[in-house]
């Protein structure tokens, strides 16, 4: 089960872990990536449509095991450029969540959907062939 980041950081004893922020356009696969990192397809809500599922930043603790256990707060953010919601509202939500990451952000993962890559590739190839 995922929690709203603001509630999680204020009440969870693991809030001292640094954060990994996942951002990108609506429908790019941010929540899917988060689920893959957790090896759990139900931790963050996803859908097959290009419409947004994540309305508020969500956070959960991810533990990476190697020689030692390293913990991070993985933050799944709402999609930017969502046509159903003003972009400034989304950016304010992300900014509020960043402020709550009191132990810093160790990485920002920017997710690019496969359709964008296909469109860019087609444009590059078309330009090259002309």
Image (spheres, grey):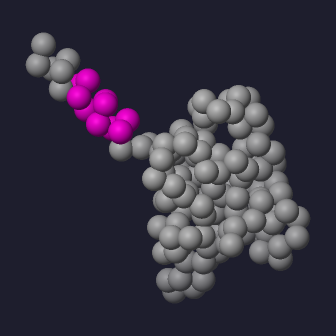
User: Residue 104 versus residue 8: which sits nearer the camera?
Assistant: 8
Left or right of 106 in this view: 15: right
Residue drawn at point x = 68 percent, y = 72 percent: 1
Q: Determine whether 119 is above or below 97 in the image.
A: above
Q: Residue furthest bottom?
A: 67
Q: Determine whether 72 is above or below 110 in the image.
A: below
Does the stretch in magenta take in 117? yes
Name the main secondary structure of what is drawn in magenta. helix
Residue 48 in view of the camera: yes
Q: Position of residue 57 (x, y in %)?
A: 71, 52
Does the stretch in magenta take in 107? no
The answer to which quarter of the image holds residue 70 is bottom right
Residue 19 in view of the camera: no
Residue drawn at point x = 60 percent, y = 83 percent: 69
Span colored in magenta: 115-124
Q: Position of residue 38 (x, y in %)?
A: 53, 72
Q: Position of residue 72 (x, y in %)?
A: 65, 68
User: Residue 82 versus residue 93: which sits nearer the camera?
Assistant: 82
User: Residue 47 versus residue 25: which sits nearer the camera?
Assistant: 47
Left or right of 11 in this view: 105: left
Q: Residue furthest right?
A: 10
């Amino acid at each position: 089960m995922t929690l709203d980041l603001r509630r999680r950081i204020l009440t969870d004893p693991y809030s001292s872990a640094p954060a990994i922020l996942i951002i990108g356009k609506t429908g790019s696969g941010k929540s899917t990536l988060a689920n893959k990192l957790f090896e759990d397809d139900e931790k963050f809500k996803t859908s097959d449509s290009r419409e947004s599922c994540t309305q508020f930043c969500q956070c959960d603790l991810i533990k990476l095991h190697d020689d030692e256990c390293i913990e991070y707060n993985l933050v799944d953010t709402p999609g930017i450029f969502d046509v159903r919601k003003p972009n400034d509202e989304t950016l304010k939500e992300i900014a509020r969540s960043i402020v709550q990451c009191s132990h810093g952000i160790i990485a920002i993962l920017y997710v690019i959907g496969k359709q964008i890559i296909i469109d860019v590739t087609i444009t590059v190839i078309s330009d090259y062939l002309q």
